[in-house]
Image (spheres, rainbow, N blue to C red):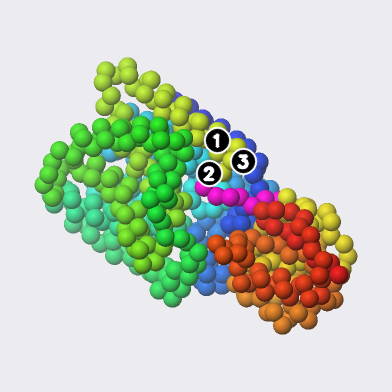
């Protein structure tokens, strides 16, 4: 227990380090704005558009009562990520032994991908924790199908899907894994668990059926480069050398564990098949679906990371002679820390817009009689978060704007060009804030329409900030 405490302390140091150094990006601002809505609008935005991550938004609502700073808000995600470290140790101990669990916990503590999403005001670290716990109670329900273990498995698994829809792919992998285990080792009682889980997540099925993949229409079809980048990120964003080290460690585990060729196998061989399904099935299924409808986004598969770490830990635990384990772990830790340190300097999976700087730029230069327009409705949300911290006078928001307080419609409404055309001449200066406005062929049509509209009454334009782009139009 002392070793696990030390590992968790190291994880805390890495997860909390420089937690507020980077500005909230677009999605983080949206998270806070959703959590700040009144209950009526909160329910509407979840049901109409943002049901994914609904569990996180609900928890964030309560969290915001105790603090509003960037560090405090992101601290909720850090808490989930830290809890995943001992949870992964417990899972590794049940699958293999305590030594393997400790190695997996070390790998999670220093993994740059885990550090990256422990510092984001989104649901990814919560999804990671719940998926580890779901798999832990999945194994408990198979080995000891008591009512308590089965109820815990059903509850945690349903919560994991409410934390992020893609967690459902893990549940499918678990269901498939049972088809590979010796029938005598599968309790009859566990068959009812899937029905209870299906009932628990049925509102999500209704949401997906009614909204489709509309909120993900911006996702691009992945190619080989995207898959290579995903492999590098999942292993710790330290380059090909660390990726090769993980491949070798996982290969050593699978070489020893996949010796049986029968369709249904004993526990010793099955545990490796389970981890392999957990690691690969969600990715491969999504890639197959992406040929028709692109859905592949690397961060959605953070929940596959524990399977990779457990396989690598199982391979490292087999290192002989035993004294070689220490230098092998040192190599993994050193390479992983290199990836983590590079993340502190620069993001490796997105081009982060500096909403903190953009908001400060607008508020510091704003004058009475100014107005502001956001080319994307939800672009207002990170701006409003930083405005609430800075407390300076703000330009009048022309779009999106329905009421004095932000409502559900401010997230989803389309620009009313006729209304904007009537309103703009009343203001001497117009601020236009652009996010994700560029397309391969230039500005998107909405941005072009807004610019042309503003230029009719405010012909002079100058750029005041970049990423997000802040343009000031004057008469």
Label 3: which secondary element: loop
Report helix, strand or loop for mark 1.
helix
Per the image, the residue denoted by label 3 is 19
Label 1 or label 3, whichever lies nearer to me, is 1
> Extreme right residue here?
368
Sequence-first tag of 1 and 2: 1
C-alpha separation, residue under disc 1 versus residue under disc 2: 8 Å
Q: Which residue is mark 2?
A: 348
Q: Distance from label 1 to label 3 (Cα)?
A: 14 Å
In the rendered image, residue 454, in percent from the top left (x then y), is placed at 76, 72
The quadrant the C terminus occupies is bottom right
Question: Residue 202 placed where, x, y %?
Answer: 38, 69
In the image, 90 versus 332, the foreground residue is 332
Instruction: Please report the bounds of the magenta region as a residue range.
Output: 348-356
Q: Viewer-proximal residue, 236 or 323?
A: 236
Neighbour tally class for label 1: few under 14, some 14-19, many 20 plus, Cα within 10 Å: some
- Chief secondary structure of the magenta span? loop
């Amino acid at each position: 227990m002392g070793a696990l405490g030390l590992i968790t302390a190291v994880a805390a140091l890495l997860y909390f380090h420089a937690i507020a150094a980077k500005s909230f990006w677009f999605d983080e601002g949206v998270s806070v704005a959703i959590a700040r809505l009144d209950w009526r609008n909160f329910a509407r935005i979840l049901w109409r558009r943002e049901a994914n991550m609904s569990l996180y938004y609900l928890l964030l609502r309560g969290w915001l009562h105790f603090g509003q700073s960037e560090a405090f808000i992101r601290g909720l995600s850090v808490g989930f990520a830290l809890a995943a470290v001992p949870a992964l140790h417990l899972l590794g101990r049940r699958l293999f032994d305590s030594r393997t669990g400790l190695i997996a916990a070390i790998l999670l503590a220093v993994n740059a991908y885990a550090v990256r999403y422990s510092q984001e005001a989104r649901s990814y670290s919560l999804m990671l924790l719940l998926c580890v716990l779901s798999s832990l109670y999945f194994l408990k329900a198979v080995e000891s199908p008591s009512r308590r273990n089965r109820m815990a498995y059903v509850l945690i698994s349903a919560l994991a899907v409410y934390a992020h829809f893609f967690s459902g792919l893990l549940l499918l992998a678990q269901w498939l894994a049972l088809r590979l285990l010796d029938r005598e080792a599968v309790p009859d009682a566990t068959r009812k668990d899937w029905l209870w889980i299906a009932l628990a997540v049925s509102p999500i099925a209704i949401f997906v059926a009614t909204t489709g993949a509309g909120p993900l229409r911006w996702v691009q079809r992945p190619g080989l480069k995207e898959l290579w980048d995903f492999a590098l990120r999942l292993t710790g964003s330290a380059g090909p050398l660390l990726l090769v080290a993980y491949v070798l460690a996982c290969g050593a585990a699978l070489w020893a564990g996949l010796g049986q060729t029968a369709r249904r196998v004993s526990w010793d061989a099955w545990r490796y098949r389970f981890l392999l399904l957990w690691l690969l099935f969600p990715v491969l299924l999504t890639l197959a679906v992406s040929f028709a409808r692109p859905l592949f986004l690397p961060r959605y598969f953070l929940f596959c990371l524990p399977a990779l770490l457990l396989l690598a830990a199982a391979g490292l635990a087999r290192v002989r002679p035993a004294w070689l384990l220490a230098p092998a772990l040192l190599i993994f830790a050193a390479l992983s820390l290199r990836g983590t340190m590079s993340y502190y300097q620069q993001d490796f999976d997105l081009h982060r817009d500096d909403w903190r700087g953009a908001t400060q730029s607008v508020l510091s230069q704003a004058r009475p009689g100014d107005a502001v327009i956001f080319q994307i409705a939800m672009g207002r949300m990170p701006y409003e978060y930083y405005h609430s911290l800075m407390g300076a006078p703000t330009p009048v928001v022309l779009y999106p704007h329905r009421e004095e307080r932000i409502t559900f419609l401010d997230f989803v409404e389309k620009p009313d060009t006729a209304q904007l055309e009537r309103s703009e001449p009343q203001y001497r200066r117009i601020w236009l804030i652009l996010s994700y406005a560029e397309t391969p062929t230039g500005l998107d049509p909405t941005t072009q329409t807004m610019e042309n509209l503003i230029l009719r009454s405010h012909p002079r334009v100058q750029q005041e900030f970049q990423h997000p782009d802040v343009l000031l139009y004057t008469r």
